Image (cartoon, rainbow, N blue to C red):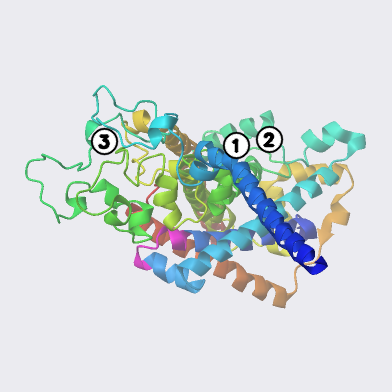
Amino acid sequence: MRIKRFDRNQRLFHLFLMLTFLIQSGTGFGRLFITTDFGRSLSSIFGGYEIALVIHFWVGTIMMVGFTVHVVYLVKRIDRRNLLNSILGPDSLVLGPQDAKHLLQRIKWTLGLDSHPKLDRWAYWEKFDYWAVFWGLPLLAVTGIMLRFPLLTTKLLPGWTLNIAGLLHRAEAILAASFIFIVHFFIGHFRPHSFPMNEAMFSGTVHLEEALEEKPAWVDRLKKEGKLDPAMAKPPARWFRVFYFIFGYTALGFGLYILINGIVYGRYIQLH
Amino acid sequence: MLSEVTNMLSSWLGRIRLLIGLALILMMTGLLGPAWAEEVRSTRYRYGEREVSTGYYEEYEVKPILYLPGGPLMRKGIPLESAPTEPVRWRTYLTDTHLGIRGYKRHHDCTDCHPQQGRDRHTVRAGITCDQCHGREPISGVNHYWSPLSPIRRHAYVCAKCHEGASVSYAEYAVHEPIPAMLSTRQTFPFLFFAFWMMVSVAGGTFVVFLPHTALWGIRELLIMKKDRAENESKQQD
């Protein structure tokens, strides 16, 4: 039996972010490591050093538009009649004191010192993953625009701010890519419980047993509110499963290729 | 009789027209006078695009008589100094900045003595050579009054060769950026130093929390799976 976890809009936003992030990583790291064989081969996938920059700029612009659309979507999702519950309730992604308690309890659980915390719909690591984008994307967007239009930037700001913009852009890109390719990939797909793939974000559903094990407070709440039966869902079609397995593993493989080579050629990174 | 009078009148009219024309030309040249003065005094037309006024306006047209650092006529207060400029070194004011350096040979590779300056984006990625910006021997110091790299004209004489439309502010970009991690950068380019260490703190803080958290989580799940498998096997045997 399966239960709905992500609706269509949420899955589309994730797919959009996934594709744009991978393209930006590929073009960006191709240019960052251009003095190495890895950088040259990665850039050649996108057409070379110069074409990679053009793609990087335009996909970055599309990312900014998507981010704006998502913020509008978020604001529209807020239930004004029930404002406090909408922003701070159990279905909200806003971090709260409960998340800090869950983090500590979970650390103790991993060391065998406590029981597993009863997590609700969104766990603290999922909330962190979500809000990290709100830190990284605007920083990358602003510094990216400064670097793309240096003459206009220096009309408003001193020229040395371009040095800082370059440093921040590269540093944030390395941080974001490292976090996604190490932490997010592991939590999502490589940990023993999810291996070979966590299908939730592609199919939109999870097994009820899995939800009971990982998010028991959420399932209990659905039962109490009488929303569990309407939340039940059919398993995804076989062809769809095959499609997103191939798609997902291609994305994973690309990310790991960048991560491993990034570590191997790390000494060639020049943050200046 | 009448025709003679007419001819005389037309010739006089011609002379009068000529005189009026000359007078008009003289008046127009008189009107240009203020424009000449305007051009000489204008900061926008003559200097703003290519060089920035030092403030010593009437002396600007004249080559400095005595131009030695620390000397009585040394130019002070050139307003434009980019952020990463190191504390003033007197050699940067010389016509030949390598004058008197023991063991200095012309036609050496610049990076033999300036290795760090060969590792920036302009050199590594754009393939620009040192002499393309600094000129050929004798290489003048970057603060020499007439050097193309003098801060008052660097943007037009050097930067704009590749970056069309470069302004004075644009030229404040540090081409030879110091290594942001080094303590000396705190003196030369503090914003860069603090931006770097802020990002290192953010990245370090994130991974210090999430790497052990994720690793321990994976190990714990492996142990649980092993335990569950062992229990299932014992149940099947029973």
* Amino acid on which disc 3 is placed: Tyr
Chain ID, mark 2: A
Residue in view at x 79 percent, y 69 percent: B3
The chain letter for the residue carrying disc 1 is A
Magenta range is: A29-37
In the rendered image, residue A251 lying in the magenta stretch gets the answer no
Depth check: give the residue in front, A252 or A216.
A252
Left or right placement of residue A188 versus residue A45 in this view:
right
Q: Are marks 3 and 1 on the same chain?
A: no
Q: At 47% across and 71% down in the image, what residue appears? A: A48
Specify the farthest residue to the bottom: A239
Q: Are marks 3 and 2 on the same chain?
A: no
Q: On the image, numbered disc 1 is attached to which residue?
A: A115
- In terms of secondary structure, where does tag 1 sit? loop
**Which residue corresponds to mark 3?**
B93
Outermost residue toward the top in this view: B72
Residue nearest the observer in this picture, B218 or B114? B114
Q: What's the residue type where badge 2 is placed?
A: Leu
Disc 2, SS: loop
Residue A57: percent from the left, percent from the top? 59, 59
Residue that numbered label 2 is attached to = A95
Front residue (pair B65, A56): B65
Where residue A199 appears, as percent x and y from the top left, is 66, 62
* Front of the two marks 3 and 2: 3
The reply to whether label 1 and label 2 mark residues of one chain is yes
Q: CA distance from mark 3 to mark 2?
A: 58 Å
Q: Nearer the viewer, mark 1 or mark 2?
A: 2
Amino acid at pointer 1:
Ser
Q: Is residue A168 left or right of residue A73?
A: left
Determine crowd level at label 3: few under 14, some 14-19, many 20+ residues with C-alpha closer than 10 A.
many
Q: Are marks 1 and 2 in contact (CB under 8 Å)?
A: no
**Is B185 situated above or below B124?**
above
